[in-house]
C-alpha cells in the first residue's frame, strides 16, 4: 500500500508566508481605493450660504427745514446667499438731548412695500406702517436666493419743534435665524437747523398806551404758538398766523415807569407750552405821564 506524499513542514511554512503577504497587499489596495473615493466625494460638496444686502437707507440723510420737511427713499433688500429665508429690518436711533428727542418724536416715519422705485410723489401703498424716529416701524418679508424686495421709506418732520437737533438712525437687516444668518446695515443722519434769534419790530399805537411788536414767522408753521415775555414774565400766548402781538402800558413792569427799557422776548412753543427756542428779542420803554402808565418803542 502506497502512502500519500505530504509537503515537509518547511515548505508549508513558506506557503503560509506567501499567502499572508498576498492578502495584506490586496487589503491595502482596497483600503486605499475606499479612502480615495470618499475624499473625492467630499471635495464635490458645496455648502449652502446665508447672506443679505441692503441699499438706499443712507439717502434719507440731510437737513430738514421749513421748505424741505420730507425725504423719501427706496430701500432694496437682496438675498445674496443660496438659501431662502425670512428677513427683518429694524431701525434704531439714539437721541441725546431735549431737542433731539423732540425732533425724533415729531418726525413721522412711514414704510410700505413697492414694486418700483419710490419718489417724493409716491403715495403710501396698502399695508403701510407709520411710526416716528422715537418709535420707528419695522419691515420684513421672505426672499428666495437672488431675489430682492423694495420698500419705500418716507420721513416727514416738523423742524420748528427742535433747534439744532440731530437724529442718527441705523437700519439693520437680518436674513435667517439664530446663528445661521446674514446681516447688513445702513445709516442716515437727519438734522434740524440752528435758527438764530432775530430782532423785533415795534410800532407805537393808541397814543403810547400800547405798542405792537412783530417777529419772523418763516422758521415755523403759521399754526404754531408763541409766548410773549415782558421783563421776564409771560404776558400772553398768541398764534403765529400774524406774527404780531400787542403790549399794553399796563403790562409793562411798574419799575420801568421811570423811563427805563424793558426786555421783550418771543418764544416758539410746543403743544404742551414748553419753549422750543427764542425767535426774537427787543426792548420797549415804560414811563408815567400825568399819572398815566405809558409804553413806547425803545
Image: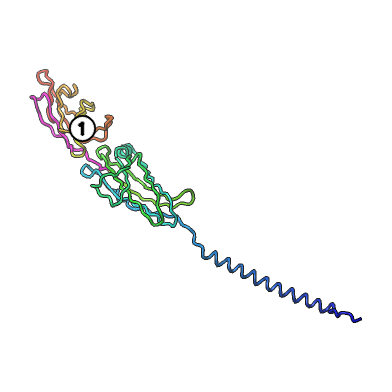
**59 to 218, vertically: above or below:** below
Query: Residue visible at 55% across and 67% down?
Result: 40
In reply to whether residue 197 is colored magenta, the answer given is yes
21 relative position to 214: left or right: right
Q: Is residue 166 visible?
A: no
User: Where are the magenta residues, as a range?
Assistant: 192-217
View extreme (front): residue: 1
Query: Residue visible at 26% across and 35% down?
Result: 276
Residue 260 place in picture, x, y as percent: 16, 27
226 relative position to 30: left or right: left
Q: Quadrant of the N terminus?
A: bottom right
Query: Residue visible at 36% across and 50% down?
Result: 186
Dot 1: what SS?
strand
View extreme (bottom): residue: 2
Q: Which colouring convention does the figure follow?
A: rainbow
Query: Residue visible at 68% across and 73% down?
Result: 26
Quadrant position of residue 80: bottom left
Residue 261 place in picture, x, y as percent: 17, 28
Quadrant position of residue 239: top left
Quadrant position of residue 206: top left
**84 to 292, vertically: above or below:** below
Q: Is residue 133 visible?
A: yes
Between 233 and 226, the one nearer to me in the picture:
226
Between 86 and 167, the one nearer to me in the picture:
86
Residue 263 place in picture, x, y as percent: 19, 30
Q: Quadrant of the C terminus?
A: top left
Residue 16 place in picture, x, y as percent: 78, 75
Between 56 and 279, the one nearer to me in the picture:
56
In reply to whether residue 94 is colored magenta, the answer given is no
140 relative position to 159: left or right: right
Q: Mark 1 = which residue?
A: 266
Amino acid at each position: 500500500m502506497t502512502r500519500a506524499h505530504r509537503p515537509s513542514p518547511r515548505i508549508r511554512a513558506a506557503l503560509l508566508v506567501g499567502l499572508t503577504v498576498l492578502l495584506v497587499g490586496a487589503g491595502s489596495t482596497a483600503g486605499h481605493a475606499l479612502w480615495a473615493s470618499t475624499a473625492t466625494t467630499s471635495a464635490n460638496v458645496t455648502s449652502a450660504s446665508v447672506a443679505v444686502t441692503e441699499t438706499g437707507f443712507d439717502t434719507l440723510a440731510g437737513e430738514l427745514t421749513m421748505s424741505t420737511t420730507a425725504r423719501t427713499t427706496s430701500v432694496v433688500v437682496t438675498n445674496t446667499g443660496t438659501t431662502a429665508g425670512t428677513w427683518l429690518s429694524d431701525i434704531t436711533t439714539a437721541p441725546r438731548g431735549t431737542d433731539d428727542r423732540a425732533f425724533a418724536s415729531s418726525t413721522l416715519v412711514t414704510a410700505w412695500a413697492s414694486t418700483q422705485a419710490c419718489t417724493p410723489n409716491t403715495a403710501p401703498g396698502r399695508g403701510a406702517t407709520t411710526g416716528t424716529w422715537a418709535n420707528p416701524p419695522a419691515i420684513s418679508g421672505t426672499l428666495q436666493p437672488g431675489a430682492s424686495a423694495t420698500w419705500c421709506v418716507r420721513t416727514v418732520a416738523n423742524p420748528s419743534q427742535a433747534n439744532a437737533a440731530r437724529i442718527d438712525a441705523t437700519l439693520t437687516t437680518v436674513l435667517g435665524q439664530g446663528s445661521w444668518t446674514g446681516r447688513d446695515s445702513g445709516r442716515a443722519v437727519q438734522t434740524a437747523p440752528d435758527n438764530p434769534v432775530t430782532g423785533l419790530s415795534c410800532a407805537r399805537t393808541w397814543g403810547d398806551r400800547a405798542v405792537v411788536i412783530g417777529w419772523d414767522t418763516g422758521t415755523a408753521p403759521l399754526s404754531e404758538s408763541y409766548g410773549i415775555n415782558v421783563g421776564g414774565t409771560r404776558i400772553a400766548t398768541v398764534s403765529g398766523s400774524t406774527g404780531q402781538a400787542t403790549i399794553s402800558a399796563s403790562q409793562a413792569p411798574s419799575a420801568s415807569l421811570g423811563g427805563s427799557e424793558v426786555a421783550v422776548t418771543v418764544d416758539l412753543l410746543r403743544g404742551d407750552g414748553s419753549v422750543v427756542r427764542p425767535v426774537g428779542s427787543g426792548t420797549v420803554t415804560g414811563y408815567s405821564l400825568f399819572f398815566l402808565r405809558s409804553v413806547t418803542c425803545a
